[in-house]
């Protein structure tokens, strides 16, 4: 297909307090694709997502959406931040948080509307959050909160959904459920998903492509293309071995380096 | 009772007290949501500098409070609300300076301006001694605060959920913070007029904190908070009015004390109500 990509990141560089955080990062995401943004702690995943969102100034490069430069007209990108500290006493129900995703930028107090309510209900049900729609959002479990935040991000019908480490702090079962949920809503709604994680294994079954970040530099391609000893050795600038065990992948520092990279 | 409502002093106190309590409760809900009650305290302390200087300058006390409050809000915005919240050393020193200046101005008030009740009025309010001429200003400021909250309602909510989520929706996060600080400063300084700089945050926080325990919905929380704030004010005024001579001698209990103690009681009662609600919903789950 010759369709324009949903997202084009071209030669992006970022420096913070004089330190290079990202260097010449280039990749594309096609409509409806599921892409994993993989890298260990401090690799620059959050920084890169914030660049895409327009929240982080760059020193070089461009970001384009559907062929256009970002601006207020470019529409909202769905976003689930890395840490949303939800106070247990916050007087917001799950459905209020989802509704804020629909029209939180508007002025005035929202009037009750059947259309708005129906849309919120539809989103809550599509992420499997109907059962706790009326609970205080701060009192939900981590996995339940992720579902609510995903519904919040999806309700404005974005073409691209960015999630920053949505699997961190989840138990293995919720981790799997969230990955399956994201793959399903991405397919059903035609939303491209870019998800950051420090472990690529939970994503292997659903990931179309991978963007691997190490020391601020990126390699992008299919999982098989990128997760290879030669590619990652080039990225890290030191020997890295890729071990495959029962369909799982382990990335470890080579024998000439005492420190493993994955914690 | 009939004497109570017939008194012009009481009518004016009820009018101003109601407006101020409603505004404080409304802003209080968002103050608790945004965890900015410390900023409210700061604005009360620094507003007192203006309130006490007002006597020396010959301007209305409310104008002094509001002027200093808005100035302090501006400084807090420039310095960074996060750092003020962080309660670092600089913040503490500035507060100390503010209270020191207030003490100086109150001293000068009694020495030169001949207003021996200035200290009481600045620190503990003057609900029964309000100049009727200040009512239009109170009403205008109340309208300004309500407009800010109503117009930017969803910005405040989304921003208290997550600054990043707000920024992604192109909400100007810094402007939102400034607008809230202005609303907060006005609400605190209005309360300072009625119940004094020392107690003003009680009218801001107690009704809101009680309401937030009782409901899962922001809209309801605002209505309940306003109910508690206004109810405390009315009951406090009534108790103060009726308490004349209770402890012997020709004294009433201070009205600001009466209002604050009722609001505090409402907060304690809300804590009792919460376990009852939780128990009820647990039962409902079992059934
Ligand atoms: N404000 C800042 N100033 C300097 N360095 C920063 C700043 N914010 C983040 N960094 C550094 O940028 C690097 C990338 O951070 P981040 O994007 O959060 O990584 P990740 O999300 O992959 O863990 C880290 O080494 C971090 O220490
Ligand atoms: Mg991160």
Image (tube, rainbow, N blue to C red):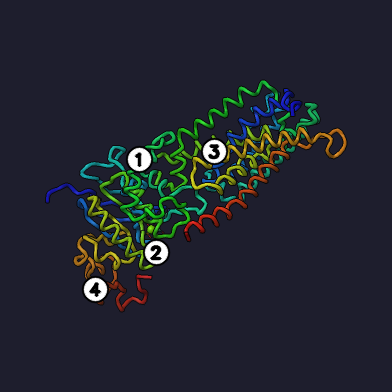
Of the pair B9 and A132, the residue shown nearer to us: A132
Of callouts 1 and 4, the N-terminal one? 1
As drawn, A136 above or below A69 = below
Say whether residue B64 is left or right of residue B181.
Answer: right
Q: Residue B135 in the image: x percent, y percent? A: 64, 23
Q: What residue is pinned by disc 3?
A: B223
Q: What residue is pinned by disc 2?
A: A170
Looking at the image, do the residues carrying marks 3 and 1 touch, with CB atoms under 8 Å apart? no
Element on which disc 2 rests: loop
Gap in angstroms between the C-alphas marked 4 and 2:
22 Å
Q: Residue A101 in the image: x percent, y percent? A: 37, 44
Q: Can residue A45 be seen in this view?
A: yes
Task: Sort mark 4 into few (<14), some (14-19) or many (20+) by Cα contacts within 10 Å.
Answer: few
Gap in angstroms between the C-alphas marked 1 and 4:
44 Å
Q: What residue is pinned by disc 1?
A: A116
Q: Quadrant of residue A215?
A: bottom left
Q: Quadrant of residue A251?
A: bottom left
Q: Residue B123 in the image: x percent, y percent? A: 72, 37
The nearer-to-camera label among 3 and 4 is: 3
Element on which disc 3 rests: helix
Q: Is residue B74 visible?
A: no
Same chain? Circles 3 and 4: no
Q: Which chain carries label 4?
A: A
Q: What residue is pinned by disc 4?
A: A247
Same chain? Circles 4 and 2: yes
Say whether residue A149 is left or right of residue B183.
Answer: left
The nearer-to-camera label among 1 and 4 is: 1
Task: Specify the quadrant that holds the C terminus of chain A.
Answer: bottom left
Residue furthest right as drawn: B249
Q: Residue B193 in the image: x percent, y percent? A: 67, 32
Task: Sort mark 2 into few (<14), some (14-19) or many (20+) by Cα contacts within 10 Å.
Answer: some
Q: Which chain carries label 1?
A: A
């Amino acid at each position: 297909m010759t369709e324009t990509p949903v997202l084009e990141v071209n030669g992006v560089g970022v420096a913070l307090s004089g330190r290079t955080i990202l260097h010449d990062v280039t990749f594309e995401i096609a409509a409806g694709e599921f892409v994993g943004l993989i890298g260990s702690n401090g690799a620059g995943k959050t920084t890169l997502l914030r660049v895409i969102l327009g929240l982080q100034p760059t020193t070089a490069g461009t970001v384009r959406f559907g062929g256009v430069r970002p601006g207020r007209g470019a529409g909202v990108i769905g976003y689930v931040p890395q840490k949303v500290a939800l106070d247990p006493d916050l007087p917001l129900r799950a459905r209020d948080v989802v509704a804020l995703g629909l029209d939180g930028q508007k002025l005035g107090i929202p009037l009750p509307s059947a259309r708005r309510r129906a849309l919120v209900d539809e989103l809550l049900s599509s992420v499997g959050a109907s059962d706790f729609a009326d609970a205080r959002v701060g009192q939900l479990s981590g996995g339940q909160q992720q579902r609510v935040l995903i519904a919040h991000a999806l309700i404005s019908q974005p073409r691209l959904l960015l999630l920053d480490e949505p699997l961190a702090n989840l138990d293995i079962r919720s981790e799997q459920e969230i990955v399956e949920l994201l793959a399903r809503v991405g397919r059903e709604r035609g939303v491209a998903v870019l998800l950051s994680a420090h472990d690529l294994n939970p994503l292997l079954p659903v990931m179309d492509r991978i963007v691997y970040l190490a020391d601020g530099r990126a390699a992008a391609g299919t999982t098989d293309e990128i997760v290879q000893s030669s590619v990652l050795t080039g990225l890290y600038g030191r020997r890295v071995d890729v071990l495959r065990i029962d369909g799982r992948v382990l990335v470890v520092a080579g024998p000439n380096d005492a420190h493993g990279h994955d914690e | 009772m009939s004497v109570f409502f017939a008194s012009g002093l009481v009518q004016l106190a009820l009018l101003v007290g109601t407006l101020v309590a409603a505004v404080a409760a409304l802003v209080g809900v968002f103050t608790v949501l945004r965890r900015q009650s410390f900023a409210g305290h700061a604005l009360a302390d620094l507003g007192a500098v203006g309130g006490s200087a007002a006597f020396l300058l010959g301007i209305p006390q409310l104008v002094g409070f509001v002027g200093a409050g808005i100035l302090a809000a501006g400084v807090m915005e420039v310095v960074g609300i996060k750092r003020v919240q962080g309660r670092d050393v600089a913040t503490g020193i500035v507060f100390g300076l503010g209270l020191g200046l207030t003490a100086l101005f109150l001293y000068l008030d009694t020495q030169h301006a001949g207003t021996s009740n200035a200290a009481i009025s600045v620190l503990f309010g003057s609900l029964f001694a309000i100049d009727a001429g200040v009512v239009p200003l109170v009403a205008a400021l109340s309208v300004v605060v309500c407009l800010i909250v109503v117009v930017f309602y969803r910005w405040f909510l989304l921003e208290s959920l997550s600054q990043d989520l707000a920024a992604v929706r192109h909400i100007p996060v810094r402007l939102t913070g400034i607008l809230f600080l202005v609303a907060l400063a006005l609400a605190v300084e209005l309360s300072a007029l009625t119940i004094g700089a020392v107690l003003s945050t009680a009218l801001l926080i107690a009704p809101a904190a009680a309401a937030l325990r009782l409901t899962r919905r922001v809209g309801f929380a605002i209505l309940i908070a306003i109910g508690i704030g206004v109810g405390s004010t009315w009951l406090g005024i009534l108790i103060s009015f009726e308490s004349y001579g209770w402890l012997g001698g020709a004294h009433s209990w201070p009205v600001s004390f009466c209002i604050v103690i009722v609001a505090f009681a409402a907060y304690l009662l809300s804590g009792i109500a919460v376990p009852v609600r939780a128990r009820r919903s647990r039962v409902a789950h079992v059934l």
